[in-house]
Image (tube, grey):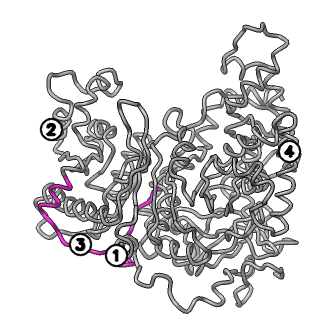
Amino acid sequence: MTHVNQKSYIVPGPKVEGESYVIRCLQDRNPPDVEYYPEVKTVYDMFWNSVKLAPDTPYLGYRPFDVESNSYGEYKFYTYKETATRISNIGSGIIWLYKKTHPAETNLKRDWPVCIYAINRPEWKMTEYAVLSQGLCTVSLFDTCAPSEMEYIINHSETPMIFCSLDKVANLLRAADKIPNIRAIVSLDPLDQLDHKKKELASSSHSLPATGISPASILKKWAQEKNIELYDLGELEKIGENNPIPHFPPKPSDLYTICYTSGTTGTPKGALSTHEQYTAVAKAFHQVDRRPNPFVYFSYLPLAHAFGRQAENAATMVQGTIGYFTGDVSRLIIDCQALQPTVICSVPRVLNRIYDKIIAATINAPGLKGMISRKAFSDKIAVLRSGGGYQHALWDRILFNKTKAILSKRVEVILSGGAPIMPNVLEVLRVALISPIANGTGMTETSSLISLQKIDDPTTGNVGAPLLTTEVKLVDVPSMDYLSTDKPYPRGELHVRSPLVFSGYLKDKEKTDETLVGDGWLATGDIAQFNADGSISIIDRLKNILKLSQGKYVAPEKVENVICTNQYIMQAFVYGDSYKSHLVAVVVPDPETFIPFATSILKNSMDEQQKISLEQLVNNDKVIKAIHQEIIKTSREAKLHGYEIVEQIHIEATPFDSATNGILTPTMKIKRAFVQKYYKKQIEEMYAQS
């Protein structure tokens, strides 16, 4: 590898048959003389070191809801010092509660996990650090996980205690006989909130039995009948305050969390990760690049997932501030504007929607506005590609200061992970938001990250270089024609070796041995390419590959990402039958742009006063044909091969999600086997029409 802006170097060593050379980031060649935050060895240390350094700095923020005005107010914050007091009390309460529910255990062992089951909120973070303060570990549930998945994770992890939002309490009590290990439930919300919401509960599908007793009292009695202790967080804090227990700090080698994978291909696996592993990632993230000051992070990526958790760890390590969204993804933009963060972590699914809104209002705008916008984007992208940075004196003043304000006037860096992001989307957003967008890759099993672009890197189509102390190599996949000897660049399955690699899967040696393949290497399942500048590109996925009848391999996620860059499409599922030579797709339109477009297609065959519903539009042949042509155009512009362009589409009015139709995992990944069965009839009809 020889390149003027080299991002990594080849580690000296013998060449192994069927494998590429090993690469590491350039900083590893000349590591810093002084360790970054040497006093921080664990996730526990991250918080308590920041309490010492910045006790009065705002830490955890939320927007209080005003019942009378039916609206959310400005952000309010707990300082590091205030949070620390609450954490110590909650931690003492946890040990008190465990002893109460396990009276036969005279010798307390700290070898059990505490489960957290809620959306992102300050109490989530407080509970996690309270658990860590007593040398315990966490296991988390996605707020939207299905009942069967909830029961499986609780039973598999053998957690005896669960902290949850108030809306989960009744569901847990209903499932009590199926989760016999649970001996205590702690509501993160006051139980007496139920008394104030009695009228709402009466008309709810989850209503409690109709009696003259308060709903909170009913829950308490119900829990007692199930031999479960039920408290709310305020009660437990008070108990902890009155029964203080000294901290029992974890060691670096102690278990930090059991993070369950999203289960796209079957039963979720519990990834075991230590404090040392998560701390290594947080340190590496800050060491490879400059960090914004102040570090104000907008939290909406699920804390049950490694990426969301690690982002908050990184903020905590540097005495940052975290502001939580209000719980509804439809209010993300409003919450972000209210917080004005300097750091945002996101995923391509969300960034694609922001991209669609920006280009609809600028590049695709009619008349003079569209013409000026196209000139502005063209000029500024040229400056960005030439290394001129993210600012432009003229066009920022005229246009881009306004588009930046869509998210935050203060945003300094956006991190994108979870899936590849299209190069054209990346460049448009970097220009429009006047902000670096660093693309990275990682997985639960690597404590969230493997590699990440540097903030000043304007390139696209890659995920940067490996993190500090991380080695990566490529291993041949002959069945898919990906070889380490490929020209001009080596290709193969990405393997990683690093202190950030997890310890294995809980109670699953077989899957552990499939993933940890010897001598410290982890097989990621991603097909990658090493580029001339030492960066890594993710080009395929080992498990999610379709083979068409003519022998061509297709990565459906790649095609779906392209389709979703079209302004009329919000979601897509691509399928290929191995006995057929082409692809079909189920697409979900974006109502905001699709309805005006589809209505315009039918305007000559409609009465002026006639209104057509979304359901009618998605089933109209003219509309289907027009949307298909849009998808073909987008696919060709992205330079997809002919066999990667879908030949038939079905338009679905109902969005894919995890709670209603179960098509997505809680981390917004498609459950492919399930979706194939879910749309079996539509897939057969599309192939019959081909």
Query: Secondary structure beneath disc 1?
Result: helix
Q: Position of residue 137 (x, y in %)?
A: 34, 65
Q: Which residue is mark 1?
A: 52
Q: Position of residue 518 (x, y in %)?
A: 57, 77
Marks 2/3: CA–CA distance: 33 Å
Q: Amino acid at mark 4?
A: Ile
Q: Which residue is mark 4?
A: 372
Magenta stretch encompasses residue 247: yes
* Residue 655 vs residue 108, the one in the foreground: 655
Q: Position of residue 527 (x, y in %)?
A: 71, 63
* Residue 216 vs residue 584, the one in the foreground: 216
Task: State the residue at coordinates (25%, 30%).
Answer: 196
Marks 2/4: CA–CA distance: 69 Å
Query: Secondary structure beneath disc 2?
Result: helix
Quick check: marks 2 and 4 in contact, CB under 8 Å?
Answer: no
Query: Secondary structure beneath disc 4?
Result: helix
Q: Amino acid at mark 3?
A: His
Q: Which residue is mark 3?
A: 247
For label 3, count other residues whose C-alpha is less than 10 Å away and answer few (under 14), some (14-19) or many (20+).
Answer: some
- Residue 85 visible in rendering: yes
